[in-house]
Image: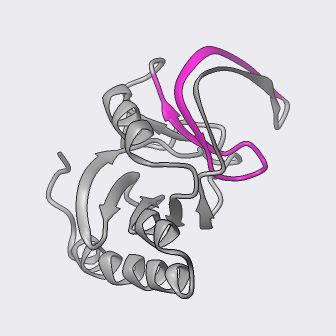
Amino acid sequence: MLSRPSRRSRALARLLPCVVLLFVAVAAAGLPATVTARAQKAIVVSLGQQAMWAYKGDTVVMSSYVSTGRAGFETPLGTYSILSKLPSQTMEGVIGGEYYNVPDVPDVMYFTKYGHALHGTYWHNNFGAPMSHGCVNLPLDVAEWLYGWAPVGTPVFVVP
């Protein structure tokens, strides 16, 4: 799905499974088996590569280009988890003085309490470039798959 990565990208890609496994191991320590099984899934979003990887254990099960927050509306770096999911939502508001109203946004998965979400995007196809007000814009087919695959509580790592 993705074009040939640079040497730095390949090095980062080799490290990502280790980072994911470390976070999953820390998260799973001392937790009940049902939580441990769910914690084997993780989503990694790279702002620099404008890409997303879904991991099951140390295996990438889905990857895609994404569009994260553009200048002034950056997607926040950090470790999160999916807090809530909505099959569809009209997103409306004012951020940084800019009004937006986007009806029927599909497959919404909030990962911060400030409104940052992974979601389907029908209003552009410019994946691989920052485009959003801070959310992680996904191609429609990827969003639909991810929504069905990732339960609430799935770790989300937003990396540089």
**Residue 86 shown left or right of residue 54 in the figure:** right
x 46%, y 73%: residue: 33
For residue 51: magenta? no
Q: Which of 75 and 21 is in front in this view?
A: 21
Q: For residue 87, what is the image quadrant? A: top right
Across the whole image, how many numbered discs are drawn on residues? 0
The boundaries of the magenta stretch are 98-121
**How is the rendered protein coloured?**
one colour
Q: Position of residue 45 (x, y in %)?
A: 45, 58
- Residue 112, image x, y percentages: 70, 53
Is residue 40 toward the left or the right of residue 14 in the image?
Answer: right
Q: Where is residue 75 in the image (x, y as percent from the top left)?
A: 62, 53
Residue found farthest to the front: 33
Q: In which quarter of the image is the N terminus?
A: top left
Q: Does the magenta stretch include residue 111?
A: yes
- Report the residue that reaches farthest toward the left: 4
The residue lying at 14 percent from left, 58 percent from top is 4
**In the image, is residue 106 above or below residue 74?**
above
Q: Is residue 82 above or below residue 26?
A: above
10 relative to 47 in the view: left or right: left
Q: Which residue is drawn at 43% across and 85% down?
A: 22
Determine the residue positioned at 45% across, 77% down. Answer: 24
Q: In this view, does 42 lie above or below 134?
A: below
Q: What residue occupies the far top of the structure in this picture?
A: 103
Give the prevailing secondary structure in the magenta stretch: strand
Measured as percent of width and height from the top left, residue 3 is found at 17, 51
Query: Which of the 4 quarters of the picture holds residue 42?
Result: bottom left
